[in-house]
Amino acid sequence: MNSCFRLPNFTLDTAAMGKVCKYHKRKGQEYKPNDIIRDFCSDAFYAAYPYCLALLYGADKNEFKNGRVCLSCPNPKGIIFEARRVHCRPFYTRIVKKILEWLIAKILYPPDWENWHIKLRVIKNHGGCPANFTAGKTYWFNIRRLDELCPASFHAIYPFFLPYLLEYNSLWQKERSSIEIHCPDHQGMIYNIKK
């Protein structure tokens, strides 16, 4: 996991499950630092996640008008990058998919099938990026990769596990060798993080 911080080695695992999700299938699934966010900066990804999610679900107003948005890493001397919506299926396949979605929604419930992939591409490095990303470096927002942490979980737990790893303990984390953090799904995962 690339980051603006020097993180100690750690392990994150699925400690308890309320239900199986598409990313995490079993209790005890273990993630090392490079399995959290592969090939992109965790700090930049944390900033990009809400925009990627909006693009994924078809946002097209204001700054999303052209299916893309330019973003900045939190590091003032870091990277400028673009999040862009890209069709993931050919035109005729999208038409058939729309018809199937309509039918399934009438019979059962609306399916959650994505129409897009989200591509993050570095536009500029201001010279202070610890990961040394260069213009043109790309990363695909994780929609189907099961060997990487769920993006929603990452976005929810990152503000809590980063201070823990850097030893800025909050009141509920004092003097513990590991912490537990819940994913945003109320029936979902509880992650155990240990240094």
Image (cartoon, rainbow, N blue to C red):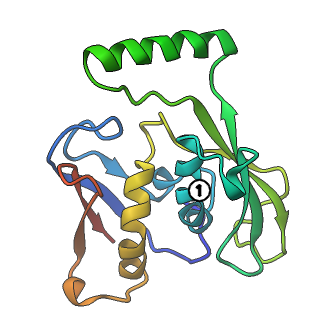
Residue at the location (38% across, 86% down)?
A: 167
Whether residue 85 is situated above or below residue 49 in the rendered picture: above
Residue assigned mark 1: 51
Rendered-image quadrant of the C terminus = bottom left
Q: Nearer the viewer, residue 102 or 39?
A: 102
Q: Nearer the viewer, residue 103 or 77?
A: 103
Q: Secondary structure at mark 1?
A: helix
Residue at the location (45% across, 45% down)?
A: 148
Residue at the location (65% across, 9% down)?
A: 92
- Amino acid type at image mark 1: Tyr
Horizontal arrangement in the rendering, residue 52 relative to residue 7 (left or right): right
Horizontal arrangement in the rendering, residue 71 relative to residue 11 (left or right): right
Q: Nearer the viewer, residue 49 or 174?
A: 49
Residue 10 visible in this rendered orientation of the protein: no
Horizontal arrangement in the rendering, residue 81 relative to residue 113 (left or right): right
Whether residue 125 is situated above or below residue 142 in the rendered picture: below
**Label 1: how many Cα within 10 Å (few below 14, some 14–19, many 20+):** many
Q: Quadrant of the rendered structure where residue 164 is?
A: bottom left
**Horizontal and vertical percent position of residue 31:** 37, 52
Whether residue 130 is situated above or below residue 71 in the rendered picture: below
Residue 128 visible in this rendered orientation of the protein: yes
Residue at the location (71% across, 58% down)?
A: 63
Rendered-image quadrant of the N terminus = bottom right
